[in-house]
Image (cartoon, coloured by chain):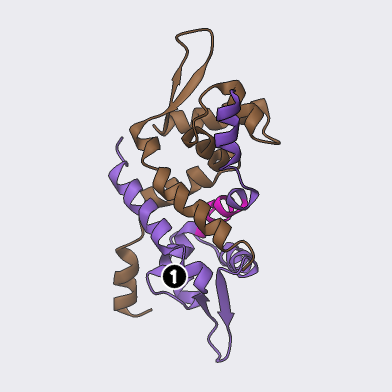
Chain colours: A brown, B purple
Amino acid sequence: MTDGDQQAYDGCYCPNFHSSIELIGRRWTGAILLAMLAGLHQYTDLRDAIPGLSDRLLTERLKELEAAGVVSRCAETRVISYGLTDKGKALGPILDGLSEWSSEWAKA
Amino acid sequence: MTDGDQQAYDGCYCPNFHSSIELIGRRWTGAILLAMLAGLHQYTDLRDAIPGLSDRLLTERLKELEAAGVVSRCAETRVISYGLTDKGKALGPILDGLSEWSSEWAKA
């Protein structure tokens, strides 16, 4: 590796990026975020909307997203609902871009 | 969930998205792609540039990315090198966006 290459890479490598991409890439997390961006907020709606997602994993993923400041939980009424924080909403264009990429390149 | 909510979600949910986000979110994959986007192509350079990444996992991840059509392998000379395909290069703006998001919201 030349010094120039190392410098170029050092400019990009970032532990924050590393943890961010692993957070959103965790099993089911992307699907949960996409469902929330599309307007689903209630726990039961999220569970019903994602085929194959168990209660246990939905709860676990929502807790992780809450801990990361991406999702906030609201239990003011009897119904538990979840909303995207500003940090979570800011993921919208990125996930839309990935959604477009996956459609465009699905057969490549 | 109202019919409208379900419809909004059905419009977004896509198995291709699901597998794409899990591909790029797999442990080390994001860091490898970012290093390649920054100009690193040789196996040894990639290994040396990412702290904590073992030979075994780098090989495994590169094979997965090759199978997904994101990376191509070139062994014409004695040096094994890897390049991003057009599909891989198209991930650039998405990963840049996530990189910016992770810097901007690191402390949120």
Q: Quadrant of the N terminus of chain A?
A: bottom left
- Residue A53 placement, left or right of A25: right
In this rendered view, identify the residue nearer to me: B45 or B11: B11
Q: Quadrant of the C terminus of chain A?
A: bottom right
* Residue A45 in view here: yes
- Residue B85 placement, left or right of B94: right
- Against B1, residue A17 (above or below) is below
**Looking at the picture, how far across and down is residue A48, in whole percent?**
66, 28
Name which residue type carries label 1: Met
Find out whether residue B53 is within the magenta segment: no
In this rendered view, identify the residue nearer to me: A89 or B9: B9
* Residue B28 in view here: no
Q: In the rendered structure, the residue with mark 1 lies on which chain?
A: B
- Against A1, residue A81 (above or below) is above
The magenta-colored residue range is B19-29
- Against A42, residue B104 (above or below) is below
